[in-house]
Amino acid sequence: MQNSIKSLLINPGEGRQINVGNSKLFVKLGSDSTDNTFSVTEYELPPHFPGPPPHKHQRFEHAWYVLEGALTVQIDEDKSVISKGGFIFIPKRTVHAFANLSEGVVKVLVVDTPGGFEHYYDDLETAFGSGEAIDQQVMRNIQLKYDTYPPDHLFI
């Protein structure tokens, strides 16, 4: 039986680019290439990027490796700064948020499992990528579509 997943080489600066506000994301490996097992995305966050509000996922888990700069991460009530070479794993159902509070660019390599979370950013780009004001109802609908809930949400 042959593996349906194919090898893939992505050179520096390559990958499908997604622009959300003034942040850039580069999908290095989409879930369509991993039988929806995981995806790999590089985040490029500009200085003073506020990031999303605290949230959690019922299914998705994140693994973040900081490539450049200093990423501020909130896990539950605790905040930490993760510098170049630092790593964090965020299990499902864990309240988390991230931001770039520094003066420099932050780059983070992100592995999301299961696959599909990269499409969250596609939807954000479609809704708000050209600098449109964030409509809270549209944002809420996108979040729910991609397993993203406020900290007080109870999973059944």
Image (tube, rainbow, N blue to C red):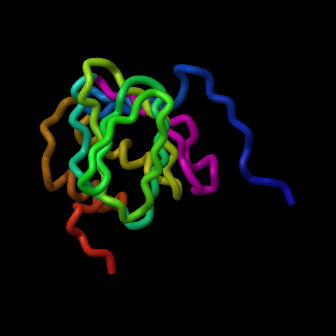
The answer to whether residue 78 is magenta is no
Q: Which range of residues does the magenta coloring cover?
A: 27-46
Q: Position of residue 6 (x, y in %)?
A: 73, 43
Residue extending farthest to the right is 1
> Residue 77 vs residue 81: left or right?
left
Give x and y (percent) for residue 5.
Answer: 72, 49
What percent of the width, then of the height, locates residue 48?
A: 22, 26
Indicate left or right for 17 with 114 as reference: left
Of 155 and 130, nearer the camera is 155
Residue 28 among magenta residues: yes
Residue at 45% x, 45% y is 88
Q: Position of residue 35 (x, y in %)?
A: 63, 56
Residue farthest along the bottom direction in this orientation: 156
For the point 52% across and 20% down, the residue is 13
For residue 101, say whether it is visible: yes
Q: Quadrant of residue 73?
A: top left
Q: Give the residue displayed 56% in from the left and 52% down from the top.
A: 38
Q: Of residues 104 and 116, which is closer to you in this image?
A: 104
Q: Name the residue located 38 percent from the left edge and 42 percent from the top edge.
A: 122
Quadrant containing the N terminus in the rendered view: bottom right
Quadrant placement of the C terminus: bottom left
Residue 126 in the image: above or below residue 156: above
Give residue 20's quadrant in the image: top left
Image height check: is 139 above or below 98?
below
**Would residue 16 appear left or right of 76 to someone viewing this image?**
right
**Is residue 125 visible in this depiction of the protein?**
no
